[in-house]
Amino acid sequence: MVKAFTCASIVAQVRAAALSLLVGLPHVASAQNGMPSIILASSTDRATAERDVHGIALGGVRTPWTEVPTIRLSGISESKSFLGVISGSGVPFTKAELGALYPGGKAEYLHRFTASLDAAIEAGHLSSDDRQEILEIAAINFDAAPYTKVQ
C-alpha cells in the first residue's frame, strides 16, 4: 500500500541515499569533488540561496521534487522540533498552479517527474530501491493538490 506524502518521507529518502553514498568516503561531499553547490544570493550580507519563480533554491543536488515540483519546498521551517527544523517545510501548489505548470496534466507531470527521478538515481542522489515507491507517491501528490492556496 502506498503511503500519503509527507515532507518527512521525501527527506528520509534523500537522507537514506546520501548516507549510503557517504559510507566509505574519506571526505565530505563538496563542490571541489563534483557535488553541485547551492547558488547563493549576492545581494544580502548573510548566506541566502537564490530561488526560482516557485521559491525553490537554485543549484545544489537536484531531485524530482525540485525539478518537477508540486510543492514549494524550503529548507526553512518555523518548527521548534528537531525533526521539523531539519526537514524544512512545504506548501502544495493548487490545482490551477499545477495546470499552468503541466498543461498536459498528470501524464505530462509523471513523464517529467520520471525522467528527473531517473537522472537523480543515475547521479547517485537517490536510491534505485526507492524508485517505484517514489513514483507512486508522485502520482498521489498530483491528485492531492488543493483547489485553493494552503497557508
Image (tube, helix red, strand yellow):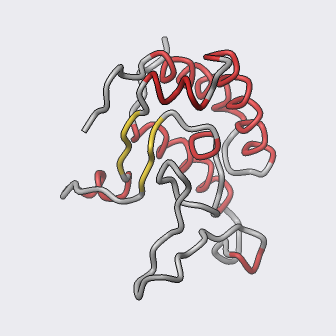
Q: Based on the displayed image, in which of its 4 quarters is residue 116 positioned?
A: top right
Q: Give how far across and how far down residue 16 sits, in percent.
A: 56, 47
Q: Based on the displayed image, in which of its 4 quarters is residue 134 positioned?
A: top right
> Where 88 falls versus 29 (above or below)?
above
Residue at image position (50%, 69%) is 49
Residue at image position (35%, 20%) is 147
Q: Give how far across and how far down residue 93 sits, in percent.
A: 43, 33
Tell which of 41 and 60 is nearer to you: 41
Residue at image position (68%, 51%) is 125
Q: Give how far across and how far down residue 66 sits, in percent.
A: 58, 46
Residue at image position (68%, 41%) is 127
Q: Is residue 82 left or right of residue 47?
A: left
Image quadrant holding the C terminus, namely top left
As drawn, which residue projects farthest toward the top?
A: 1
> Where 148 falls versus 58 (above or below)?
above
Tell which of 62 and 4 is nearer to you: 62
Tell which of 140 and 53 is nearer to you: 53
As drawn, which residue projects farthest toward the left?
A: 80
Count of numbered circles on the image: 0
